Amino acid sequence: MQRRLDEVRGGSPRRSPTVRALAAFAGRSSCRLAALGFAAGVDFDRLLAGTRHAMPFGQSPFAFQRGNSFEASLRADGHAATLALLRDLPGFPAGPATVANIRAVKGMPERAAETLRPPAPVVNGRPDAPHLIDGAVLCGDVGGVRAYFEADAVAAFAGGLLRVGEVKSFPKVDGRVDPDKLGAAFDQAAIYLLLLRAAVASLGASPGALVSPEALLITPLNVAMRPALSRKDVSRQEARARRLLAAVPRVADVIAAAPAGTSFGPVADVKAAEPGRLHALNVLADKVGTDYAPDCLSGCGNARFCRERAFHAGAPCLTGSAAGRLIPNVATLHRAEELTRGVAPTPGEAAAAIILARAGRLHDSP
């Protein structure tokens, strides 16, 4: 299968699975083109770089630098700022606390194995359990393939509970965090929580007894670099994350269903002229199939390309999901307009034709 994966990926930019990539894919898992790219590890955010359809994703250099500076401040002086925050939590020692920092370990599989060592004292009820695990890597099955995810922090408290922690550089102002950013951060933390439960279970312990459903979010307070702590029970988000992982199509099945000769390589060739690259992606999309919706614009690097295809095809999806559901089995907006004028529908169009004919009469009535 690896040879076939390499063929499909071609020379396109690669993207390792992350919780952010996984969450973004969840919203468009019905799109076969997106599923093929996700299975092959293609970075759609960079696939169309240099063309008119390139999406302006990614952090600005200033935001990236701010994030790195904030994370560095949390690790300074033996993680003093982070430990000071955690001391407000029940069960955390008021005195000295120990930190297991595994960021220096080379290789994601090796770091994942090392991540399992610090929780072992917690599982065994030993008092030498670390209070903070920095740079933890958790692994899980994504589409039948082992994937590794780097968590910002996993905190092990004296009471024996493990919590997941996420660090973000957006601020907490007047006690509040932007709700959209807050929700996205806790959605990511919920995936880490799900993976942490699996890691604890692999050690022969009960995740329900040792893993807290509460996730931690550390962000700057106002405009300074002083950290602030937010806490939330993410049980509901964890249940959604479990469904998300279960719904990811198996990589082997996706690759096996791809037509022979399918490859993202010609699309990613930045030395080629734009028309040729877009033609290659159009051919690929015709072979595989797409499922464009307006909300793809917020998370898929191919969204502008698919929107243009949908526009030229007169696809009903351009009207939005709610309107599209009202006209099932109507192939194009042009066909929908014909049905508003009373054109005889096909059997599959019958239900939508009733609504469209009524709308046409209302529009034409004086």
Image (spheres, rainbow, N blue to C red):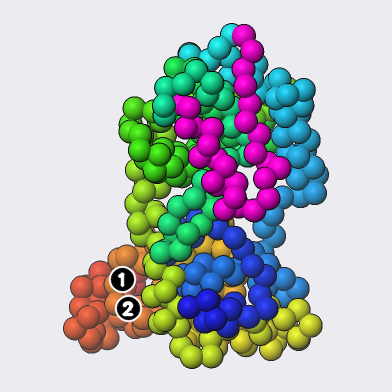
Image x and y of residue 175, in percent:
59, 20
Secondary structure at badge 2 equals: loop
Spatial CA span between label 1 and label 2:
6 Å
Residue 327, which numbered label?
1
The reply to whether the C-beta atoms of the residues labelled 1 and 2 are less than 8 Å apart is yes
- Point out the image quarter for the C terminus: bottom left
Q: Residues within 10 Å of mark 1 (few under 14, many from 20)?
A: many
Q: Quadrant of residue 83?
A: top right
* Residues shaded magenta: 95-122
Q: Amino acid at mark 1?
A: Ile
Residue 198 placement (x, y as % from top left): 40, 43
The kind of secondary structure element at disc 1 is loop
Residue 330, numbered circle:
2
Of residues 207 and 18, the one drawn nearer to the viewer in this rendering: 207
* Label 2: how many Cα within 10 Å (few below 14, some 14–19, many 20+): many
Q: Is residue 346 above or below residue 14?
A: below
| 64 relative position to 305: left or right | right
126 shown above or below 200:
above
